[in-house]
Image: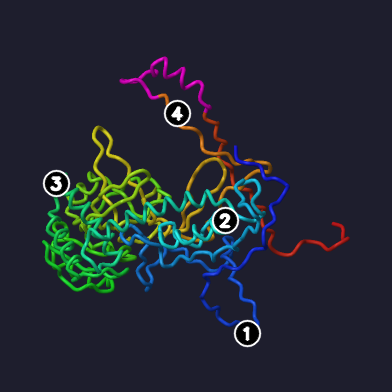
Amino acid sequence: MPPTRSTKRAYSEPPVDPEESTKKRKPTNGRTEVSPPPSDFSSDGFESDLPLAPGAHDYVDYSLMAQGGQDEGSTRPPRQQRWKHNGAQPINDPALVPEGWNADELDLDVNDIDSQVQRCIERISDGILPNFFKFRLSQYERRRAARDEMVHSEPAGLSWDIVRRLEHLKTIERYLSTNGDPDNQLPNVKAITKAYREGKLGWSRGWVSYWSKGVQLNTPQKFDADVHKKLAEEYDTTKAWWVEGFPVHISADSQRIGAYGLTLWVCHDTGADIMAIPQCHVDQLESLGIPVPVHGYNIMDIPGSTTVHKVVELDVRLVDGNGDPLCHWMRIQACVIPSKPGHQFGSILSGPFLRFALYTATCPDGQGHLYVCNNKKELRKLPALPHGFVPEGPPFVSTAPAAPGGGEPPRFVLDQHKVMRPAPVQPPPIPLPAKAPSKKGKKKGGKGVGP
């Protein structure tokens, strides 16, 4: 059980301002600056009824897969107030920590090893739960040792970003050498690795270089959609083609004229940075004569392990049950996953493209649906919850598999299944509230006037 908070408080000094904050604030001339209010979902402002049209905006890099860092568009909160315990003995009981204190370091990236080490040292000196921060410090010191080992394994003078990228390339090279290289990417991997180690190639977010059959086609430059399309027309992008830097979201309306496609079911994945598509569907697209450009291979982090996947370029859009498009074509990246053996093809994971193409919303009505629309006004049509309705978690998935060939599972599996929590019955869909008909025109008769 978690410790209960004692009413007896350890005496500590009031919070002090963070010591490391050196950024200057912009003068406000005595005015108080506040953030603008968030958009109102029920706004009656003008919204186009057509699908979202492509605009003249910068191309968005929503994938952190190849960058290995934080999205530049995101901001971290400032460091929270710092507490220092002035007693003779440190506070080691979590129930006695000062009210308002916590162990969070939300202003720091969890992978910023040096900053996290320094913060742990400060926390230990503050005298509040020092043993916990000593343990956290030991974790980061082990990671710092692993990082230093990686740095020392490469030529001196390379940046940490390049060292980390070289580690990825070594993993990719081992994977291709062991599992085969159907797209002839090993010449590119070896050439890029050599260029990094010799200092002829740098790494900068948003800058890309193109490689074909182990030959570098351009010096690194800011990603440009026109250059990307021009090179794709001049070279075979389905074999021995590599984009170092991995730009994404290349065009807001990019379906090639005259190209056909496939309509497939996708599983919405709320946390993925990139779409995942089985190789069998890529094979079908290519059999239709639709080229599927290959950007290369990259490292994918999944819970508990790290895997290597081919990265391809696809044109996608979402359609409704009638086949009518809900958004324009979007050119995105997708990682290719092996096709499942047996009778199933495997699911396509949508990745984040839905959030870039449409408005999305959920409702705690027990159905677990994801609502999508291309007009903000449509969000007003979400189901209404009845008074007193208490949202519950999703139902438990049955763990009693069917017997081979159909029929009931083995008896011992059924007995085991009975002791598990039964799946709750989902409530029926909640109808939308009825709208009262609007009355137009003047009311007949005046006040106090009879028929």
The question of residue 280 being in magenta is answered with no
Query: Residue under circle 2?
Result: 380
Gap in angstroms between the C-alphas marked 2 and 3: 52 Å
Q: Residue at x 27, y 72 (%)?
A: 224
**Disc nearest the viewer among 1 and 4:** 1
Q: Residue at x 50, y 43 (%)?
A: 368
Query: Residue under circle 4?
Result: 398
Mark 3 or 4, nearer chain start? 3
Return the mark for residue 180.
3
Say what secondary structure mark 3 lies in. loop
Instruction: Check the picture and name the quadrant holding the N terminus.
Output: top right
Give whichever of 396, 371 is nearer the camera. Answer: 396
Task: Measuring from the top left, give residue 156's x and y in whole percent.
Answer: 23, 66
Q: Are marks 1 and 3 in contact (CB under 8 Å)?
A: no
Q: Which residues are magenta?
A: 401-422
Mark 1 or 3, nearer chain start? 1
Task: Measuring from the top left, give residue 349's x and y in whole percent.
Answer: 35, 47
**Amino acid marked by disc 2:** Arg
Principal secondary structure, stretch drawn in magenta:
loop
Query: Residue under circle 1?
Result: 29
Indicate the colouring scheme: rainbow
Pointer 4 local density, CA inside 10 Å: few below 14, some 14–19, many at least 20: few
**Amino acid marked by disc 1:** Asn
Instruction: Check the picture and name the quadrant holding the C terminus.
Output: bottom right
Pointer 1 local density, CA inside 10 Å: few below 14, some 14–19, many at least 20: few
Q: Are marks 1 and 4 in contact (CB under 8 Å)?
A: no
Gap in angstroms between the C-alphas marked 4 and 2: 35 Å
Residue 424 picture quarter: top right
Gap in angstroms between the C-alphas marked 1 and 3: 65 Å
Gap in angstroms between the C-alphas marked 2 and 1: 41 Å
